[in-house]
Amino acid sequence: MHRSIRFTGVAIAAGALLAACGSSSSSTGSASSTTTPISGGTAYFAEQPGASPNYIFPITPSGEFSVNNLAQFQVLMYRPLYYFGIGNKAEINYQLSIGNQPVFSNGDKTVTITMKHYEWSNGTPVTARDVLFFINLLKAEKANWGAYVPGAFPDNVVSATAPNASTVVLTLNKAYNPTWFTYNELSQITPLPMAWDRTSLSSPAPNPNAANLPDTTTAGAKAVYAMLNSQATDLSTYATSPIWSIVDGPWRLSSFTTAGKAVFVPNTKYSGPDKPRLSEFVELPFTSASAEFNVLRAGNNAITYGYIPTQDLTQKASVESLGYKVQPWIDLGFNFFPLNLNNPTYGPVFRQLYFRQALEHLIDQPAWIAHFLNGFGVTTSSPVPTEPSNPFADATSRTIQYPYSIATAKNLLTSHGWKLVKGVMTCENPGTSATQCGANIPKGRTLTFNMIYASGVTSLAQEMTALSSAAKQVGIVLNISAQPFNTVIADQPRCTPTQSDCTWEMVNWGGGWEYSPDNYPTGGELFGSGPGHTGFGNYANSQANQLIAATHTATNAQGALDAYQNFMDKTLPVIYQPYPDYSISAIS
């Protein structure tokens, strides 16, 4: 959601940036400062280029399900039930969580959660009913939630009850591995204030203890969701809305612009640990990394927590001379770009494994890291991260399966029925045998594609130029163009070939996927498929589904994860590329 769909990750990024500005909380995989906490004043955080927050409601659609919305915006105001990140470890931080450690019983089919005392800024307590409110809305509108996977949460919850104000009991449809369920299902819950349980802003705020509130029926929950989503799409009202001003996190919005400048002030009713010490916290939007760096190197503390673009790392010493500490911010995630397997014209080509292998052979990951990222990145060979240090990745994921080779890429195409015609690979031998182009690829089809990538990041532009150049050498014409980050992530919908919005071909937002709210690196949201749902690029594979499901229930959890990642290593559901450090942070 960088900028990345880096769909918010194991780093709760906001914790780190505020740690750097005086709070003592920490964040997994991210840079933070250990300086003496300050009191008062304003700190300025530089948003990634073109990646300003644009959705405030915690039940966030896939097109807005990004780091800049979840981990750097919403979490400041609306605390998740479970908060992740202890230093650089991908672990639950129970100290900063609303929920105590869950208790599994009944053969791991019942989960009991007790809640600590937190309060909303309107003076009402955060209760088990607020958790049920979230679940009720999610059940009614799960298809509009970026983390939804058919069969997973909330489908795997048979019932959710609140026997008292501080206890939630979930009955599951079968036994699940407690670690997986906690890290990848309970992690998705954000309690919502009952004051939001209404169908219009003109209706009075409900009595939170009343029976038969709208969310208790599917129709009512849908009406509540429609109202909240409508408010969330009106960015101009974020700071003035009577809805969004009710928070349980340490911060609340005092102003917000549609360009993405967010000004936070302390929530004086915040009842959790690590209370704000700053008087004000400001997130600043930038259209490009160079624009941010111009402000950073000008000094004057206009940016408290910023970043050095990779192409400007030669100026690291001068930045440090201004009083900044420079260190990388590393997320638990991986990087890729999807191909639209359902594109009505090119989907049949993209579905050919040999074509995806050829494209992967055109990505020189070590060279890209060395020359475009100045060493601040890691190679990607599977969906399971290799950095920061973790026990999840096996030897196969730590090895590039399809190393850079123009000759190999070209041979893969020519051995499958393609021939260079006027410099462009053209299908000359259609059909489905081992030496033909593949199913539904007609004679004369050319390998000419369009790719959009996120603007404002020089290293990504360099990578895409290098890929286009390498592709040209094997007869693939790759027309690349830059668009704002938020445009890019919205322009890759899950779709069917007959839909009018299914004409996209390749998109690259540059940041891949950051693991959160699912923090155990299995592949449900990414690559799971079922009725009404496909993975990135409209990926759907029954064997992948079986391997993903096994990671949820297997007693040998690591063995199941190894089988999953090795399948994804070899079969390329997406095209892997180097995973950049989230930023080279400059911390004042």
Image: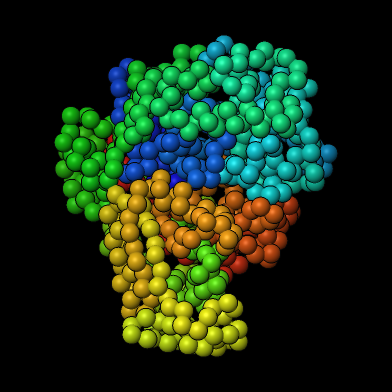
Which residue is at the front of the view, 567 or 36? Answer: 567
Give percent across and percent down for residue 258. 36, 32
Visible residue check, residue 476: yes
- Which residue is located at x 55 percent, y 12 percent? 122
In this rendering, the count of numbered labels is 0
Residue in the picture at 44% in, 71% down? 360
In the figure, is residue 153 to the left or right of 25? right
The quadrant in which the C terminus is found is top left
Instruction: Relative to 41, say whether 359 is above or below.
Output: below
Q: Quadrant of residue 220?
A: top right
Residue 32 appears left or right of 415: left
Q: In screen coordinates, is 466 left or right of 221?
A: left
Q: In the rendering, at what x and y percent does residue 387 appear?
A: 46, 54
Residue 134 locus on image (x, y percent): 64, 30
Decide which of 432, 111 is in the foreground and name it.
Answer: 432
Q: Nearer the viewer, residue 143 or 10?
A: 143
In this orientation, does residue 331 appear?
no
Q: Residue at x 57, y 80 (%)?
A: 438
Relative side of 107 to 39, left or right:
right
Q: Is 138 in front, or is 565?
A: 138
Query: Residue drawn 68% across and 30% down?
Result: 221
Q: From the viewer's perspective, is residue 152 above or below residue 131?
A: below
**Which colour scheme appears in the figure?**
rainbow
Residue 161 horizontal/vertical position (percent): 77, 28
